[in-house]
Amino acid sequence: MRIEKSNYKALTQNSEALDKNQDRPLILVTNDDGIHAPGLKALTEMARRLGEVLVIAPDEGRSGMSHAITIKYPLRLNQVHKEEGLVMYSCSGHPADCVKLGINQVLDRKPDMLVSGINHGSNSSISVVYSGTMAAAIEGGLHGIPSVGLSISDFSSRPDFSACQHYGMQILENTLQEGLPGGVCLNVNFPKLPMEEIRDIKICRQARGLWIEEFDKRVDPHRREYFWLTGYFDNYEPDDQETDEWALKNNYISIVPVRVDFSDISAMEKLKSVYANTGI
């Protein structure tokens, strides 16, 4: 990963602009829907009420990129806005790239919090694995930064973010004040509801489920096949289990603490017995 050397001076100057008021928290904001997404604007407005804000977001939509990083091409940052307490860049890379550049190149101190979103579409259950929004939050958690990914169960281009902003402010304030355990970030999902119909916030676990892929096969004018990915989500959990899917279905905001550790402890114990007498 590299950026052009000619950008170093400009990046340093912008970092200093954000550091003028070090009494206020420093917040890094990103997303996967791109620098022009309404959800990013809504989240930036929230973050500005809490501290000095650096926004680094993809120059176009990078949804579904998961934790991809750019290693074959140079990364480019372009300043798109600057005012007191707010500096914004578009980035040619993916959400995880945005976080890495912010921490390693643009800022000269670790952010007090990282927020990602507000994503257009839910990132509950298995979607956390594919989500660029959550990859950015996870990357922040890996660096020891209290990080929150926020999403709304609305895939339209212009969702109503008023409930997200109202309840999301409480979540961000709590995260700043209380912090999070090392390596943990929050996966926050809002139901597609007006504010008065949301029942409460529910701390819950990730639902077991899977996206069932259905590829729409077509043929182009040159008689070559191509495919559009479609499908639907299959929830494997009973309706009485308090998972993130259950919470959203029952008009709650779901919060799932997420940690990157794919170790399966129960499987380890079984495998130890299987390999105990291999003689290797």
Image: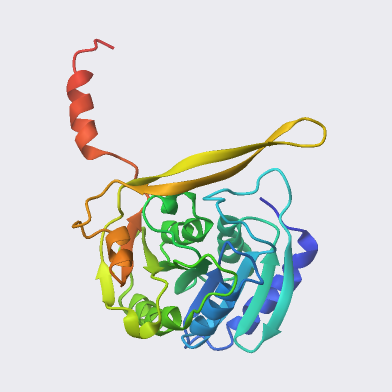
Image location (x, y in percent) of residue 74: 73, 51
- Residue at left 53%, top 56%? 132
Above or below, 224 relative to 168: above
Image location (x, y in percent) of residue 69: 60, 49
- Position of the C terminus by quadrant: top left
Query: Closer to the camera, 39 or 252?
Result: 252
Image location (x, y in percent) of residue 197: 33, 81
Query: Closer to the camera, 146 or 189?
Result: 189
Query: Closer to the camera, 210 or 256?
Result: 210
Q: How many marks?
A: 0
- Colour pattern of the rendering: rainbow
Above or below, 60 relative to 2: below
Decide if residue 224 is on the left or right side of residue 235: right
- Residue at left 37%, top 50%? 260
Query: Closer to the camera, 237 or 76?
Result: 237
Residue furthest out toward the right: 222
Above or below, 102 relative to 67: below
- Residue at left 46%, top 59%? 134
- Residue at left 56%, top 62%? 99
Quadrant of the rendered structure where residue 163 is?
Answer: bottom left
Decide if residue 103 is on the left or right side of residue 78: left
